[in-house]
Image: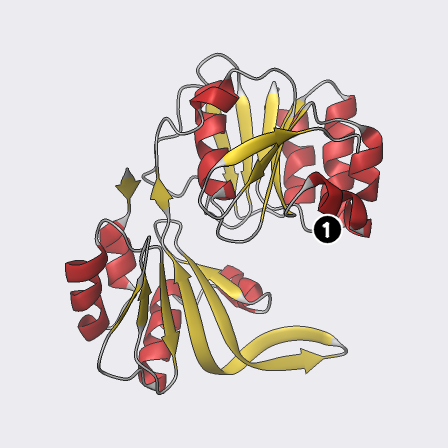
Amino acid sequence: MRCAWKELLGVLPAWIAAQADRTGRDGLRELRLRLEKPPELVMDTESVWMERRVSREDLHFCVNTASRYSPWAAQTISEGFLTAAGGHRIGICGEAVVKNGTVSGIREISSLCIRVARDFPGIGERAVKLSGSILLLGPPGSGKTTLLRDIARGISRREHVAVVDERGELFPPGFDTGQRLDVLRGCAKAQGVDMMLRTMGPAVIAVDEITAEADCEALIRAGWCGVRLLATAHAASVKDLHCRPIYRSLVSAELFNHILVLSRDKSWRVERMDL
């Protein structure tokens, strides 16, 4: 198991970082900070609560340190998250700033959910042996990104893999990228898939979290060009996937040969697409 632990501690106020380092170095999954409440360290099997309460200054410290005031970070904050160095995702809650019916930012931040990015080399070996395109399904926190990362890395031992890493969570700097793996960071998935298809000559294109019809359309274009696909989507089962309008075109295209359905305990099973 690998983790950019120093990078995680670097975005935390000193008093929170000290206890997180003592308590959660090996088992911390999430760190939840809520205004005027004690921090919650979500471990593999339990939660550990600190005694001191979180201040607004603590919340601002995390956001400002993680974002480094970059324009890209400001854009992702409007979507409710930040990606800190090391691939750690910070979910943000507070008062939304809405302009012309669209959320443009979040002010008066009231809580943060910091998900610790950990790398587990070898967990995807069983899936690496599968031929064709693979779609990973699961609820938030089920380990889709972690499994996708290892499958992509494993496939790169024999084929060229192009990764569109929109949020910088799949392969942040410092993570092992395998032998034949190229990463495009910070680019929207739909545009990135088209760019990789035109410029990198991949055998496989990998993306994390299909969330828009444009993502589906880009994957369909790539699939019709003979490229294998490796992707994740939020759904508890193939039945749930069929019920979500956003995925209708992807389901109809029948591009995926294998559907891996993950559970919150990080186990996974294979289901058929044609329910």
Compared with 80, 122 (above or below) is above
- The residue under label 1 is which amino acid type? Ala
Q: What quarter of the picture does the N terminus occupy?
A: top left
Compared with 273, 131 (above or below) is above
Residue lying at the far top in this picture: please name it: 158
Compared with 24, 169 (above or below) is above
Residue found 68% across the figure and 21% down from its top: 227
Residue found 31% across the figure and 74% down from its top: 39
Closest to the observer: 213 or 272?
Answer: 272
Residue that numbered label 1 is attached to: 212
Q: Position of residue 126 (x, y in %)?
A: 47, 21
Q: Position of residue 180 (x, y in %)?
A: 46, 19
Question: Circle 1 sits in a helix, a strand or a loop, which is it?
Answer: loop
Q: Left or right: 119 with respect to 275?
A: left
Q: Residues within 10 Å of mark 1 (few under 14, many from 20)?
A: few
Q: Left or right: 15 with respect to 268?
A: left
Residue found 72% across the figure and 47% down from its top: 240
